[in-house]
Amino acid sequence: MNFKESPFMYGLAAMVVVFVLAQSVFFLVKAWKQGKKLGISSQTLRGTVTSSILFSIAPAISVVATVIVLANALGIILPWIRLSVIGNITYETTAAEAALNVFGRSVSEPVQDPQQFSAIMWVMTVGSVFPLILLPIFLKRIQKKIGHAAQTNQKLADVIAAAAFIGLIAAFIARAIAGVGTKEDPADGAGVLSVLTLMIAIVLMIVLTKLCERFSLKWLENFTMPFSMLGAMGMAILLTRWLPAAWLIEWRY
């Protein structure tokens, strides 16, 4: 039996998903009742709920893409559980890859050892617990400091925010361009396929952004990044089929 997709794992996933859905329904009902107490019309409340649902579609696409990326190594259930709670694409992939690298593995090959799978699961889970502990303690102080800095020098605050985002993206881009593979697993490093996938994602992002600006497609703005990710992933699959030897071509080991 495949331990990664055993009845126990399915049962665990079902409990997590049911809990998350129940929590969402609970707060939705509480918010609806509070809105009615404040005198907000049912039409306005329905519009807010509809907008929230539509706004959540774009992040959900990114979540699905992350599940697909991790499913080859970890199966479908563990990524599904992790991303149903507090996970996101930047953390889950980084944590999984860090744990896999310790065992000399990558996301390109399935994990067959239950102990390794358990260790990877704990790395992904425990790492995401710290924000839940630290934020209630330090968030108010951090917000006060950031708010004061933003009021004092708005331009500096914008630069710091942009630099933090660029630094995060640069970490992933650097791996695609200069990541070091191994002779045992050359596909784990940078190569023709990784660079082509990166370039396709950039081009798609630019094209979609220009389309939004040119035709005032407000609805598309929230989907530019997920569509770029999925488009680049699809092209990577096609390139692997069209150029089966190209994905092994790398310049670093």
Image (cartoon, rainbow, N blue to C red):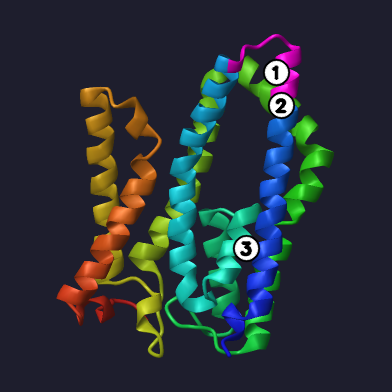
Q: Disc 3 marks which residue? A: 81
Residue at mark 1: 35
Visible in this render: residue 198?
A: no
Kindly indicate the quadrant of the structure image that contains residue 10.
bottom right
Region rendered in magenta: 31-42
Question: N-terminal of the two: label 1 or label 3?
Answer: 1
Which structural element holds mark 1?
A: helix
Sort mark 1 into few (<14), some (14-19) or many (20+) by Cα contacts within 10 Å: some
Q: CA distance from mark 3 to mark 2?
A: 26 Å
Quick check: marks 2 and 1 in contact, CB under 8 Å?
yes
**Residue 89 image position (x, y, % from top left):** 51, 55
Residue 84: name its quadrant: bottom right
Q: Amino acid at mark 2?
A: Ala
In the rendered structure, which amino acid carries the disc numbered 1? Gly
- Residue lying at 56% horizontally and 66% vertically, measured from the top left: 79
- Give the mark, 3 or 2, whose residue is nearer the N terminus: 2
C-alpha distance separating marks 2 and 1: 6 Å
**The residue tagged with tag 3: helix, strand or loop?**
helix
Compared across the picture, whether 153 is left or right of 233 comes to: right
Q: Crowding at label 2, few (<14), some or many (≥20) Cα neighbours within 10 Å?
A: few
Which of these two is toward me, 7 or 191? Answer: 7
**Left or right, 30 with reference to 150:** right
Which residue is most to the front? 42
Q: Is residue 36 magenta?
A: yes
Give the residue at x 60% y 20%: 45
Percent across and percent down for residue 59 are 48, 45
Residue 10 appears anywhere in the view: yes
Quadrant where the C terminus is found in the figure: bottom left
Locate the N terminus by quadrant.
Answer: bottom right
From what the image shows, is residue 93 above or below residue 84?
A: below
Q: Which residue is mark 2?
A: 31
